[in-house]
Image (cartoon, rainbow, N blue to C red):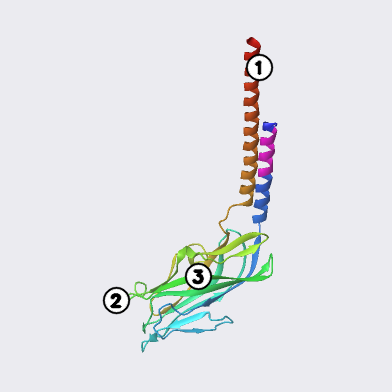
Amino acid sequence: MNIPKLLTTLVATTTILFAATENAQAITFSGTSSGSWGLPVVSTGVESLSDENGGTNNRLTWGIAATTSFRNYVQYDGLSFSTDVNTLFAVGDLTYRNGVTYYGFNGDFPLEVELSFTNPFNNAESFNYTFNIFNTPNIYNDPVLDGDILLFTANGLTNDSFNFAGVDYTLKLAGFSSDGGNTFLGVFNSPEDSVANAILYAEIIKVDVPEPTTIIALGLFGIYLTGSLHISRKEATGNRQQATGYIIDSL
């Protein structure tokens, strides 16, 4: 076996396979998004869901408003998108109205985000997340310090994924931005007795599984090692035979 030739072939083949994978990753996903909230895990009995701006269950309302204020709600409006893999994009427009209320809730509630793809295929994929809200006690007499906080849990990850061209992808939530994506925050703070807006950003990423090219490369490397060991054994056997013959001849 020609070891240098095999090694050269191994490197060249692996390089080609990795290049093919990089080209496969150069995919642009386009379409529209939508979002649907669910009721809180621990309910106070005064929460409700409604359809707004053409959405479905995209507004969650809660609390009983004080005389001079209004009820709380958080609303998700979908957006059009066109993005590459591992690239942040605006996936939802969030509106958070924070009133002075009684019977607010603290804790988890679900959000389902749907991406309706038009490129590179026509399909709708859903991703489920858990959001959390904290209703700050109004003790500071400051709208910002008394503001309520919305955030997503599990580092923005979901167990849901989709497959395109043999590769599994998922949607990872990244953060909130109120300045067009220049800065990002992990929480959405809505000042007391006001209405705040923020854009939710996310990215489409590959599901963390072993790369096919890595598996193939390891397989080729295994072939190389097997061949090398086979050659080494043959050489060792040949050397022993030569040594044995020399001893016999010398007797």
* Numbered range of the magenta stretch: 5-14
Above-or-below relation of 58 to 27: below
Prevalent SS, magenta region = helix
Residue located at (63% from left, 37% from top): 226
Does the magenta segment cover residue 113? Answer: no
Does the magenta segment cover residue 10? Answer: yes
Q: Which residue is mark 2?
A: 139
Q: CA distance from mark 3 to mark 1?
A: 75 Å
Q: Nearer the viewer, residue 227 or 110?
A: 227
Q: Residues within 10 Å of mark 3 (few under 14, many from 20)?
A: many
- Specify the label residue 92 is tagged with: none
The amino acid pointed to by label 2 is Ile
Q: Nearer the viewer, residue 13 or 181?
A: 13
SS at circle 3: strand
Pointer 2 and pointer 3: residues touching (CB < 8 Å)?
Answer: no
Measured from the top left, where is residue 63 in percent x and y?
40, 84
Q: Residues within 10 Å of mark 2 (few under 14, many from 20)?
A: few
Above-or-below relation of 174 to 104: above
17 on left or right of 178: right
Looking at this view, name the residue that lies furthest to the bottom.
67
Residue located at (49% from left, 65% from top): 156
Measured from the top left, where is residue 209 in percent x and y?
57, 55
Measured from the top left, where is residue 16 in percent x and y?
69, 45
- Specify the label residue 129 is tagged with: 3
Q: Give the label, 3 or 1, closer to the camera.
A: 1
107 on left or right of 250: left
Q: Quadrant of residue 116?
A: bottom right
Q: Which residue is mark 1?
A: 245
Pointer 2 and pointer 1: residues touching (CB < 8 Å)?
Answer: no
- Locate the C terminus and report the quarter of the image it occupies: top right
SS at circle 2: loop
